């Protein structure tokens, strides 16, 4: 039995990937769409895991970066007619650059002040999308672009594989020197500086990685929906992404993926409750957080895993201790 | 090894240091004494690049370091143990030490060698290597802060009030360890409010008062000059 657990621990990402890949065989068209969105959200949330979880820089502008990725892809394809793959690449690059610029306020601002800056950024992007009608289609939205693959199942498979690669990368960062630098910034910026961490560079890398994944996720979103409008990128979306990171435990890759997919699907599962569905949704989340607020200040899906005695991710730093 | 010439530092408009001159010779322990607000910590922060000097030069091993970034200064071999320890409370002892070697490109083997050295110096840390730093006692945290600084193999170790808030027995251990570190070849710049302690283990001493060096010399000589110590540090009655 123990052997099974260690094996599961080692290959948990592969297991998740396998489940995700065979899932379309058992789902209806609509359920398949929900799973697709879950996987796409997970890519975005892994970016936020680096930014918010590892580095401790709170952002509520993530939907805006997602929008940047989506719209850049859409606009490049519709207006310039370039190939989807080149469009995707350029969209990711441009989103990364814009996201990196967001790091500059973070050099001087922290905590609530940084949050407000990112909210401001989010609103600016949303309003630009609404008003640059000739480019973005305004409130009517943008459509009529090609997808990466004509077959939506291929897009899905590609997305799942990408998610796995991103997950492995994110996990590696956590254990790397960069990850250590980011964690040290979260804990104490002055101390990190004294230890020789180039705080500004680390912050920029963190923002850049997070924006890159947002851009990637945005491209996939454009592929899934075939249509984009400013309504899909409101600050409520940013809040949902924040929720996904927090519920995922803020330091666990597997936790982040599971929580992304569960939170994406939860409102759909609760649809039979009709109008009281949002109330129940919020209650479920609250109860979950209350139950898994284990000892440390980090509630998580990792908490569930701990109960199942699977050691997912590197929760070495987040919990434990207490025998002082 | 470390040479500070005419260092003036001001927080916004209020000057804190007035042309401070200070020298730390290689292989020695130099104490920087002074009452609260004398400018001791400010001097250290200016040296490690945390705050900008208004004017003056800071040289380390013949190289001008004033104006450099903190990470560049750490790379040159200057480690700073800040006031109040500032260990990373949510990281384990092991991770704290690992960050100490952040500017060095150690191979896993080298990392282990250096970590073992620190564990040898502070066996207590070895016992607690997986524990979160924030859950340890003040003395253990101070040991960790010193050990973390030693991970970068510094030529000069700067300590900002290592005795702060510790029990007398623990302070003695810490002071013994500082002497031991120095014997192994690391130069030490020690900031202390507790003049007696610092003078007992240091070779040279400087006394700061309201941002100026008012007294300097060999520690023994300074220690004998009771009247001056009383005037500036409020020594024994």
Image: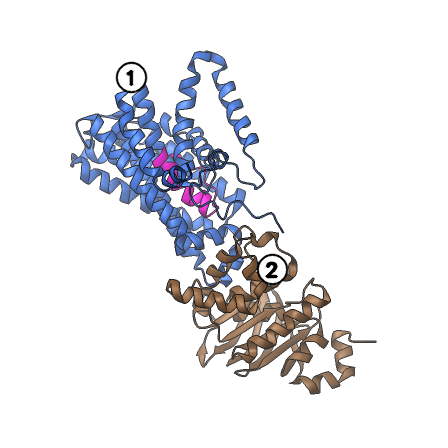
Task: Tell me residue B144's x, y (percent).
Answer: 56, 62
Q: Name the main secondary structure of what is drawn in magenta.
A: helix
Residue identified by numbered label 2:
B141
Against A152, residue A174 (above or below) is: below
* Magenta highlight range: A42-63
Q: Does dot 2 land on a helix, a strand or a loop?
A: helix
Quadrant of the frame with the N terminus of chain A: top left
Left or right: where does residue A60 sit relative to residue B86? left
Task: Tell whether position A105 is magenta.
Answer: no
- C-alpha span from label 2 to label 1: 57 Å
Q: Residue sitting at 57 percent across and 48 percent down?
A: A321
Residue B178 visible (yes or no) = yes
Q: Residue furthest right?
A: B237
Left or right: where does residue B59 sit relative to residue B33? left
Residue identified by numbered label 1:
A28
Q: Colour of chain A?
A: blue
Q: Which mark is residue A206?
A: none
Q: Colour of chain B?
A: brown
Viewer-side residue, A214 vs A32 = A32
Task: Tell me residue B236's x, y (percent).
Answer: 80, 76
Picture quadrant where residue A14 is located: top left
Numbered disc 2: what chain? B
User: Mark 2: few, some, or many residues within 10 Å (few <14, many ≥20)?
Assistant: many
Task: Tell me residue A129's x, y (percent).
Answer: 33, 31
Numbered disc 1: what chain? A
Against A289, residue A180 (above or below) is: below
User: Mark 1: few, some, or many residues within 10 Å (few <14, many ≥20)?
Assistant: few
Q: Does dot 1 land on a helix, a strand or a loop?
A: loop
- Disc 2 to disc 1: CB gap under 8 Å: no
């Amino acid at each position: 039995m123990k052997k099974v657990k260690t094996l599961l621990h080692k290959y948990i990402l592969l297991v998740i990937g396998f489940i995700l890949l065979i899932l379309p065989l058992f789902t209806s068209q609509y359920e398949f769409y929900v799973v697709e969105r879950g996987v796409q959200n997970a890519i975005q949330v892994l970016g936020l895991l680096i930014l918010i979880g590892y580095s401790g820089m709170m952002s509520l502008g993530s939907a805006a970066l997602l929008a940047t990725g989506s719209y850049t892809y859409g606009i490049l394809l519709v207006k310039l007619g370039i190939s989807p793959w080149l469009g995707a690449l350029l969209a990711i690059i441009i989103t990364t650059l814009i996201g990196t610029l967001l790091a500059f306020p973070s050099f001087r601002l922290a905590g609530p002040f940084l949050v407000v800056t990112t909210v401001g950024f989010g609103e600016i992007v949303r309003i630009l999308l609404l008003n640059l009608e000739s480019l973005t289609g305004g409130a009517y939205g943008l459509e009529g672009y090609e997808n990466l693959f004509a077959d939506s199942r291929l897009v899905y498979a590609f997305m799942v594989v990408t998610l796995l690669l991103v997950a492995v990368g994110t996990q590696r960062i956590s254990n790397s020197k960069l990850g250590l630098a980011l964690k040290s910034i979260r804990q104490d910026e002055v101390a990190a500086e004294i230890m020789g961490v180039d705080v500004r560079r680390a912050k920029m890398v963190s923002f850049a990685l997070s924006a890159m994944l947002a851009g990637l996720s945005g491209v996939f979103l454009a592929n899934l929906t075939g249509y984009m409008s400013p309504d899909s990128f409101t600050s409520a979306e940013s809040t949902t992404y924040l929720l996904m990171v927090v519920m995922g435990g803020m330091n666990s890759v597997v936790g982040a993926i599971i929580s992304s997919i569960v939170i994406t699907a939860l409102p759909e599962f609760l649809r039979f409750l009709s109008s009281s569905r949002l109330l129940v949704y919020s209650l479920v989340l609250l109860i979950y957080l209350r139950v898994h607020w284990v000892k440390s200040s980090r509630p998580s899906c990792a908490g569930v895993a701990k109960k199942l005695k699977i050691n997912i991710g590197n929760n070495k730093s987040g919990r434990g201790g207490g025998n002082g | 090894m470390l040479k500070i010439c005419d260092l003036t530092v001001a927080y916004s408009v209020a000057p804190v240091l007035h042309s401070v001159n200070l020298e730390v010779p290689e292989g020695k322990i130099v104490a920087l004494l002074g009452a609260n607000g004398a400018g001791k910590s400010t001097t250290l922060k200016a040296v490690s690049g945390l705050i900008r000097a208004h004017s003056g030069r800071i040289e380390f091993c013949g190289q001008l370091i004033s104006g450099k970034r903190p990470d560049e200064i750490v790379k040159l071999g200057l480690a700073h143990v800040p006031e109040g320890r500032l260990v990373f409370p949510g990281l384990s002892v092991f991770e704290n030490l690992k960050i100490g070697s952040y500017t060095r490109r150690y191979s896993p083997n080298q990392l282990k060698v250096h970590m073992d050295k620190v564990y040898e110096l502070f066996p207590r840390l070895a016992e607690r290597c997986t524990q979160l730093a924030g859950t340890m006692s003040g003395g253990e945290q101070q040991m960790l802060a010193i050990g973390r600084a030693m991970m970068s193999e510094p030529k000069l170790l700067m300590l900002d009030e290592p005795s702060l808030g510790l029990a007398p027995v623990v302070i003695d251990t810490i002071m013994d360890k500082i002497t031991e570190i120095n014997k192994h070849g690391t130069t030490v710049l020690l900031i202390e409010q507790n003049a007696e302690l610092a003078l007992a283990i240091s070779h040279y001493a400087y006394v700061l008062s309201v941002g100026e060096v008012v007294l300097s010399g060999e520690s023994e000589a300074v220690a004998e000059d009771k009247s001056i110590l009383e005037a500036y540090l409020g020594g024994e009655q």
